[in-house]
Image (cartoon, rainbow, N blue to C red):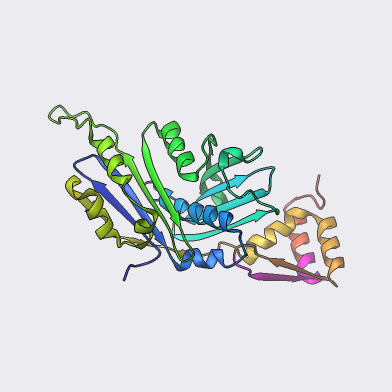
Amino acid sequence: MIADDMMHRFLLERAGVRGVLVRLGAAWRDVAARAEYPPQLHTLLGEAMAASAMLTGNIKLDGALSIELKSAGALRMLFAECNDQGRLRGLARWDDPLPVTLALDELPEAIMAITIGNVERGQRYQGLVDLRHASLSDALENYFVQSEQLPARIVLAVNGEHAAALMLQKMPDEGGHDVVPDEDAWNRVVHLTSTLSAQELLETPPEQLLYRLYHEESVSLSEPRPLAFGCSCSRERVSAMLRSLGRDEVEAALAARDDEIEVICEFCAQRYYFDRIDAEHLLSESAALGAPDTEQ
């Protein structure tokens, strides 16, 4: 059986190419089951989920990496995130009717961002993704060329049970005097990758898949990293959000629900309840810290 919810790093030593292979199972199904996503949005969200995990494969991550897409059209927002513990979450919001094909370059006023960092520590890097391409894989490939000046090849695949991602990236030329550069290595690897079908990516065990594609390139496979659905919400974070709203907003929320505030996490459906005593405690903390009671 193929192990689900794993990330595999590998190296094609002969070609000087590094890679990441991700296959999601239960982690993807947990996210997909939280809304009745139209088929085209189901596919795009699954691709983004697999891609968010894939992108953590070749960086030193302290915090989380997210892919976020917003537009002025029917696809209002899509968000996928993987943190440094391998915990994934994601969601999308939309208005009907959605375009039959969700071509990124045709979404009105669309913006896509990749954000890396630890928000709680104030460390954050955000890069905007050029949306001159219809598919998420093409857009991400272009992002790598622009941000790192190194070519990348990305393949994404989704069905009802699994989401998968494969990334290959050309490694920088070390420029050693005794090394004869293989000028055709990257083109050779790209050609081999073009023979990969979506079904094969979703259903073939990683070792078998990599051997089938790249056995002549001296494949070196690292220990896999487990992945799982996980949400970073907490009562502390919800409390901080309520404090930021100010007294007027909190009072209005209490009045609307018989002196109780209910906050439901959109990612995991966890419910948080605050009564008037809780709310007064939060607002008094806010005042003690010198925060304003109302929004400016």
**Side of 92 relative to 273 (left or right):** left
Q: Position of residue 70 (x, y in %)?
A: 63, 45
Q: Is residue 32 above or below residue 287?
A: below
Residue 73 visible in rendering = yes
Q: Position of residue 42 (x, y in %)?
A: 55, 58
Q: Position of residue 178 (x, y in %)?
A: 12, 29
Residue range of the region highlighted in magenta in the rendering: 268-280
Question: Residue drawn at (36%, 34%), measured in percent from left and top?
Answer: 150
Closer-to-camera residue (19/44): 44
Q: Position of residue 123 (x, y in %)?
A: 53, 45
Closer-to-camera residue (236/30): 30
Quadrant of the frame with the C terminus = top right
Q: Is residue 94 above or below residue 234?
A: above
Question: Residue drawn at (26%, 31%), measured in percent from left and top?
Answer: 173
Q: Is residue 130 above or below residue 233?
A: above
**In the displayed image of the protein, which residue is found farthest to the left?**
178
**In the displayed image of the protein, which residue is found farthest to the front?**
100
**Side of 139 relative to 79 (left or right):** left
